Structure formats: C-alpha cells, structure tokens
Image: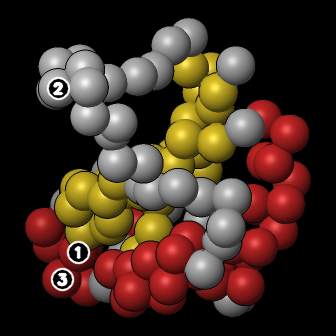
C-alpha cells in the first residue's frame, strides 16, 4: 500500500520545502498547490491575513511507502524550524497512470 503525506507550509518556507523534498532519494515526485488556510488561531496570522481572514500557504502532497514515513518526517522537520507545520497522512487504495503509449515505459 501507499500513503499520501499532505503538508501545509507557509509561503516563506515554500522553497526550502521544495529543496528538502528534491534532496530525498525516496521521493520520486510531489505536487504543490497554493491554497488559503483558515484557522481559529488568529494570533498566528499577520495583520493583512487577519483582515483577509485566511493565510496563503502551500499544500504539498507526497506519495510514499508507509515504512518511509518516520524518515520522511524527520528529514522535513528542519524546514519547520521553530514553526509547526500541519500535516496528515492518508492511505492510498490505488495509484497508477491512465492512457499513454503502452509500448513506451512511463517516466517516473
């Protein structure tokens, strides 16, 4: 089985998280999206974010082998520094590729 690690990362450390994930041989790839985070913890928001009502963050999604989760989390911890990064893990029932030329191996 595979797991999906979802990380919510402040925009200030977006590039550091990209670099950290790219440096890990166990990570074949990942997805990143810009999202708006809403929370009751307004003290963690800047003044502009408090006015807007949300915080702009990056959502990272990483497919990985469940056995690698402790190593993956430990390797990404330095990116957080003194901040706390929200994450969760979801089981992935199936993954693969759809379409493409069956005679050409997929790029992975």
Instruction: Please say if 76 is above or below 106.
Output: below
Q: List the residue tagged with mark 1.
A: 49
The nearer-to-camera label among 1 and 2 is 2
* Residue at x-position 17% and y-position 19%: 99
Assess whether mark 2 and mark 3 are in contact (beta carbons under 8 angstroms).
no
Instruction: Please say if 33 is above or below 85.
Output: above
Q: Is residue 76 left or right of residue 36?
A: right
- Name the residue nearer the viewer: 90 or 36: 90
- Name the residue nearer the viewer: 52 or 32: 32
Element at label 3: helix
Q: List the residue tagged with mark 3.
A: 48
Q: How many marks?
A: 3
Assess whether mark 3 and mark 1 are in contact (beta carbons under 8 angstroms).
yes
Residue 101: give its label.
2
Question: Is residue 34 shown to the viewer in this render?
Answer: yes
Q: Quadrant of residue 10?
A: bottom left
Q: Is residue 20 left or right of residue 46?
A: right
Question: Is residue 17 shown to the viewer in this render?
Answer: no
Percent coordinates x, y for residue 71 in the rendering:
85, 60
Using the numbered discs, state the Cα–Cα distance from disc 1 to disc 2 in whole angstroms: 47 Å
Residue at the extreme front of the image, as rendered:
103
- Name the residue nearer the viewer: 76 or 47: 76
């Amino acid at each position: 089985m595979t797991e999906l690690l979802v990380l919510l990362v402040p925009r200030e450390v977006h590039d550091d998280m990209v670099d950290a994930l790219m440096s890990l041989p166990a990570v074949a790839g990942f997805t990143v999206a810009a999202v708006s985070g809403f929370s009751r913890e307004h003290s963690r928001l800047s003044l502009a974010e408090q006015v807007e009502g949300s915080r702009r963050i990056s959502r990272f999604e990483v497919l990985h082998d469940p056995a690698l989760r402790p190593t993956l989390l430990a390797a990404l911890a330095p990116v957080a520094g003194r901040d706390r990064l929200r994450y969760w893990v979801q089981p992935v029932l199936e993954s693969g590729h759809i379409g493409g030329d069956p005679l050409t191996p997929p790029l992975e």
